[in-house]
Amino acid sequence: MLQLLTPRRGGRTLRRLVAERRLPAHPGLNLLVERGLVKEDDAQRLMAQAAAAREPIPVTLARSGLVSGHEWARLIADHYGLELAAKTDIPEALILEGAFSSRFLRQNRVLPLAMDGEQLWLGMADPADEVTIKAVRLAAGREVVPVVIAVEDLDDGYARLFEGGRSAFAEMADGIEPAGDGAGEDSVEHLLDLAQEAPVVRLVNQLLSDALRMKASDIHIEPYRDRLQVRYRIHGKLREIGAPPARLSAAVISRIKILAKLDIAERRLPQDGRVPLQMGGRRVDLRVATIPTIHGESLVIRLLDSAQGDVELSSLGLASQDEARLRDLLSAPHGMLLVTGPTGSGKTTTLYAALRTLDAIRDKIVSIEDPIEYQIGGVTQVQVKPEIDLTFARVLRSVVRHDPNIIMVGETRDGETADIAVHAALTGHLLLSTLHTNSAAGAVARLLDMEVEPYLLASVLRGVVGQRLVGILCDRCKAPYPPGDDERHFLRLAGIEPDPATHFYKAAGCRHCNEVGFTGRVGIFELLRVTEPVRRLIRERASTQDVLARALAEGMTTMYQDGLNKALAGVTTFDEVRRVTDDG
């Protein structure tokens, strides 16, 4: 730990910068304002709230939901060259026990992390707090080295050191009376009051801000008989986190339903809602879905970060040759281009990135979506509403009468939509859409199964992108290893001959990636171009295997091969590639 927490060579502590009057009393807040993460009036309000509550600024900030404690800690540490400690750096036993009361440590959000001779490494939520540094120096009789640590990690440390492992969520929940099990009007009124109490609001804000910090795509809140399970889907995999007490299940779910403008009195039927939030200086849309279970309502939140809607084609992970070919297909004046893959494979993101390459000023672009995940400037976006019979097919019929150049159909779900889409592409429109198939070549058979005429499909189909998402290895902790016999066998099957220098990489986990070993996701792709030989096969209703064989003969790289190339380059792991491409 001491090596980890040793101050960076040549770096100056924040307190020295403050002492030299080179920084204002609360530089962190000013920095947030400069970065556009917090507005000036919000900063002033937070200062007043922190002063009134007699608590450090990062605590007030985390509670507000504007910026999480982890975001604050990273910003302060990076900007001023301070060390950043993690939850794993908190010792098993309190250092200098008896020198500080638990009340003092909690109130000032500090915790001793390590000691060496005359130096004490002090974890601090706000390392600009000179008064606390002086107090610790006097009590410990040692020079204090401030280290930045997130409020959330400190709270977990306090729970472990002083409360026998009670979580920060449990501490927030103290003093809250649970709602009854009844479904009457009194129970609903009590639940409404409970859901709007400050501790419940803080609990939900913490769940959301932690999910954003950990780059989760979904939050699962699942009640059971004696516990409430909360899981985040991070890089495609579910990960259980510390949860609020089970007695607060109804209150937490009701709070989220209130945000999503759902009926909190209706607990017998599934509900869907959506709520836009401003968190951490960026817009986040939450898609909320509930279902009734034997232990109460289960809820899933899909987090749609507006920043993710700005993805460029060049950042998807396409091989340079495939990206060039895809851009060429997108420049065609008419025809059909499809993106295929299972749910959650990034198809919509690819379509959005494709739309961003097009000229929305010169061309009329209309998208038909369910739901609209991100707003795109210059694109007319239409939300499908099946409950009022506003289906993909019905909207598509109307859209072709609006003089569009380019049409995006979020998903081709049925034969009627497929037939209208094919005819739209045949009559001078460039049509982009998605299909649920396991491979690019499989899209041909899927459309033929929807009773699209082979000669029409052969005439309009220009290309098909197949894709999956794999985890991106953390550059800080990934570890190389030579491939084993099985892995060498798979490399040879893919036409890659391993040599002594061939290495794969595995995920290790560190504080920079929250111990998961991955820092995001990237696509692996295959691009099927519909050449004249492929058109001939489509007209002949050839099998998927025949279409694939022809595409491979013409130089197509499969998703599996693209994934292996990324694994050999250290972008992802061999296991990730096998996991997402093993279709049984």
Image (cartoon, rainbow, N blue to C red):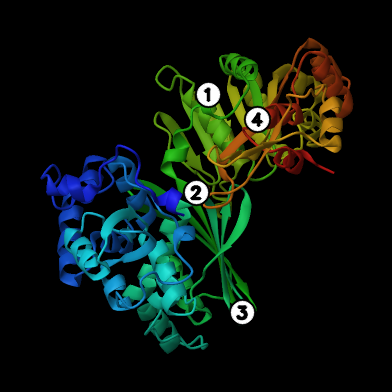
Check the image and name the residue furthest to the left: 21
Give the labeled residue for mark 3. 295
Can you see residue 259? no
| Residue 17 image position (x, y, % from top left) | 18, 45
Q: Are marks 3 and 4 in contact (CB under 8 Å)?
A: no
Left or right placement of residue 440 versus residue 8 in this view = right
Q: List the residue tagged with mark 1.
A: 314
Label 1 SS = helix
Residue identifier under label 4? 421
Mark closer to the observer (3, 4): 3
Q: Earlier in the sequence, mark 3 or mark 4?
A: 3
Callout 1 amino acid: Ser
Left or right? Give the position of 504 relative to 571. Answer: right
Kindly report which numbered mark, 2 or 4, lies closer to the viewer in this rendering: 2
Give the Cα separation between the discs numbered 2 and 1. 21 Å
- State which tag comes first along the sequence, 4 or 1: 1
Kind of residue sitting beneath label 3: His
Where disc 2 sits, the SS reads loop
| For the residues bearing labels 2 and 1, Cβ distance under 8 angstroms | no
- CA–CA distance in space, label 3 to label 1: 46 Å
Kind of residue sitting beneath label 2: Lys
